[in-house]
Image: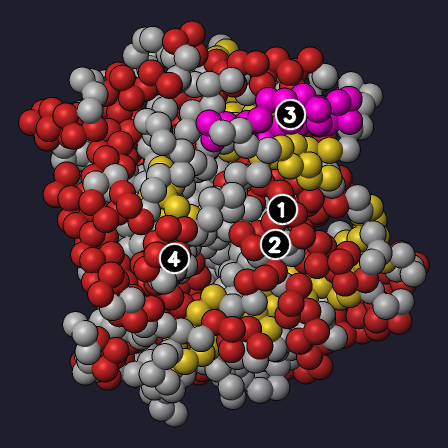
Amino acid sequence: MAGYAPITPTDQAEMLAAIGVDSIDELFAQIPEDLRLGRPLDLPDGMSESEVYRFLAGLADTNLDAERIPSFLGAGMYDHYVPAIVEAIIGRSEFLTPYTPYQPEVSQGGLQVMFEFQTAMSELTGLPVSNAGLYEGPSAAASAAYLAMGQTGRTGLVASRGLHPHSRETLATHAVGFGATVAEVGLEGGLTSGEELEAAVTEETAAVFLQNPNFLGAVEDVAALGEAVAAKGALLVVAVDPMTLGILRPPGECGADIAYGEGQPLGNRLDFGGPSFGFFCAKEEHIRKMPGRIAGETTDADGRRGFVLTLQTREQHIRREKATSNICTAQALNALAGMVHLAWLGKRGFVELGELLARRTAHARRLIGGLEGFEPLADAPVVREFAIRSERPLDEVLRLPGDEAGPGPLLPVYPLGRDYPEYEDAFLVAITESRSVEDVEWLAHMLEHGQAGWDEHIHDHDEAGNPVANGAVR
Amino acid sequence: MSDATTIAETPQQADRAITIYEKSVPGRRAAQLPPLGEGVEETPIDQLIPAHLLREEPAELPEVSEPEIVRHYNRLSRRNFDLDTGFYPLGSCTMKYNPRLNERVAALPGHARLHPATAPAEAQGALEVMYLLQESLAEITGLPTVSLQPSAGSQGELAGLLLTRAYHADRGRNPGKVLTPDTAHGTNPASVTMAGYEVVKVATDEQGGVDVDDLRSKIDEDVACLMLTNPNTLGVFDRNIAEIASLVHETGALLYYDGANLNAIMGQARPGDMGFDIVHVNLHKSFSQPHGGGGPGAGPIAVSERVEPFIPRPQVVRVEDERGERFELDHDRPKSIGRLRGFQGNFGVFVRSLAYVLSLGGDGLAEASRLAVLNANYLKARLAEGRAGRYLPVAFDRHCMHEFVLSGAPMKKELGIKTLDLAKRLLDFGYHPPTVYFPLLVDEALMIEPVETEARSELDGFADAIERILEEAESDPEIARNAPYTTPVRRLDEVGATRRPVIRQPR
């Protein structure tokens, strides 16, 4: 048993004497007898470090991760290459193990990182005010709704069907508590319908939610759509993929009041969905209504520059039921990973990466959309992800054949059917700098030749019995 | 130290804060991207995407080389105090050791590079990790079902309150109030408001527990739920919990358990057995996930049978049929409150916490709580001696659980130094201060949680430091009033920062 506790039996005896009791049980006497468990927890015995490692490594081995097969899964989280320095920096005890910076004199490192992060997010989105991060993308949509409702005194929320399905569902979940209604605006040719949007926005609308690029990967004309929103006095909220902001017009220049997004593509691992971070930027007039932590610059008693958590009267530990949000612990370490990745890409690298994604994605869409039996779902411009329609049922196209042990795996692309019944025949393909031309050609081959291709390209099984793609192993 | 206010600047203080943007030099860079690849054309971007949808000016990101980035952030890291370096007795935060094994297993490619939309059949190991953690937390909390989805404690609270709403709505009820004790953590009332309920405060009795008479006068048909922490934020176990539970349940309301203080009772008593319907657990407290300077965490919720139909979706389930045993993500939950966030939750946190549970086992978890309570009572006894006993009396004088609260009121009155001054002076002695000015009902409060992973010598050293600070304050209170002296910066102007907010680097 690894208790990680340094108290010896001798310590214990002396400590009990100092307390003035005979046993630890006496200290627990304040719990009424009939509420005490009175038996050991029904959990396995503790294991040694090497046993725990072996057990969990064994489970990890059964997963078909992006190290083993070229993954074209996206839908908000992407297999970007994370530079080695990110791991080195976030692994430092000084960043990994402190609490929230409640004592700023001994938290200057973390606070300055927040200040730098806020600057970077403000630059990316083109909005002047950024917080130090939220939990992740979809729940940041709920935070935006809460802010918009408070600022406008209205209760209507309008969301494009191009908004991530998880964000739309998260909005619906929170709307029950907020006392809000959520209306949806449909897509037309893969883009948010301007006509439907105009009809949906009323004097009761607090906020309109768009996503750019939208869930199908298409680049929206946010500025044009936003005109109808501003005309009715509603706030325009735009969800953005940070990795596209090297080339796309930032939401702040398109009339957005709030921009938020999923931060995972910046420096964070896929981790089967988390932890990552969310970011949240807004116009100046919303600064005192922002959710979450904000770091600000100040000076110390001797006039040295320093940083503190600021505008804390918004927060739950001061304002309690009147707080602008209930958020306490958020994602400081993940935001640091994002900041380090951004510094590594730098001013030019960030643009170059956006350009690389756009060019490789255009190439991949041409290649896969041109295959016999496949076509792009829409013609709208894309940056790093696109939707493809298949003539044959997806079950047939994406399911690779198995053996006597069971069916083969699905090709790692994102079928749209669960979230969009109207696109039951379509799937998303996501591109990163880690997906080479050869990977894309492998995917095209799989799609086109199905079983035959699978047989040629899979020739091995790992220890756990999972097929390993031949041309795909890195 | 009588000249303390004028001591010389330390080398670290002389090293003034410079941001990564201020280190930027045009033309420097770190990243080298891979080539486009054979056959991919270098088409001008405005031929791929219409020009009016494109950015005109690049974002101002720093232009720095890789060695500069590493040096910059390493130097910044040294301006942080951290748990791996020193004692961190923040009350209600459970700053226990973060095992490095957990980092290693979370970083395995099978976990770290697994896409969240991977088909369940190709993610069996990940789903099993989640299932095993769900089962472990169910046993520890004494409730049958666990949803891992909430991202942190506050999202767990909000989830619990939305579950409460759904539970009542399903019975055709729509009560409008939620009761919280006046000792509650600030996230409780904030979450209550976000769930659309009105907050009603319940008083605390002289034992530090819920004032049952006050509760009786406030509980009625319009109450949806009572939110409690037990042991509460004073570190006191509420002996009346059975009576409280029956009072609450009689009116049809639910009982919610804030798991911030679960570290006191693992393997000793279970919220489910006390009558709680909904519990949130902070994996970044009791289950050793590192705090990361303010996250990430995770806030799973455990619920009773009658609340189960409403839990967030998707839920990891174990299926057994002719194809054998496997794990699936169950989306088909018609009464679910829906999603609180994207995908399946903070999986990387789940891996670390499962590693912790596996390492300790059932007996180890129980022993951790016993030692946490021993350490807290020992430190409380040490601080009842000498000057601490005189100037910093314990707020509720009985055996505590895993934490206890002192009042700095006599210190302020007799020595003229506030709890804040004591906290800042502790920094000069190499200790992170306790939680200060919380709970609100104790004047000049200091809330101390020493956790089980601290050695007795650390506790003694901390008690000695407090004694020395009080002793020096008897002769010269100015020393504490102007502290700290040795930290990277000295006391900071927080009021000025709020009045004229500078929250980003000017361009």
Q: In which chain is the residue bearing label 3?
A: B
| Residue drawn at 20 percent across, 58 percent down | B471
Circles 2 and 4, Cβ within 8 Å, touching? The answer is no
Amino acid at dot 2: Arg
Residue behind mark 4: B412
How many angstroms separate mark 2 from mark 3 (CA)?
Answer: 23 Å
Residue A184 location in percent, x, y? 81, 50
**Which badge, 4 or 3, is on the more N-terminal residue?**
3
Circles 2 and 3, Cβ within 8 Å, touching? The answer is no
Mark in the foreground, 1 or 2: 2
How many angstroms separate mark 1 from mark 3 (CA)?
Answer: 20 Å
Residue behind mark 1: B190
| Res. A61 in view | no
Residue behind mark 3: B215
Closer to the camera, A244 or A97? A97
Q: Is residue A260 highlighted in magenta?
A: no
Circles 1 and 2, Cβ within 8 Å, touching? The answer is yes
Mark in the foreground, 4 or 3: 4
Range of the magenta residues?
B207-228
Residue found at the far front of this picture? B414
Residue B251 location in percent, x, y? 72, 17
Amino acid at dot 4: Lys
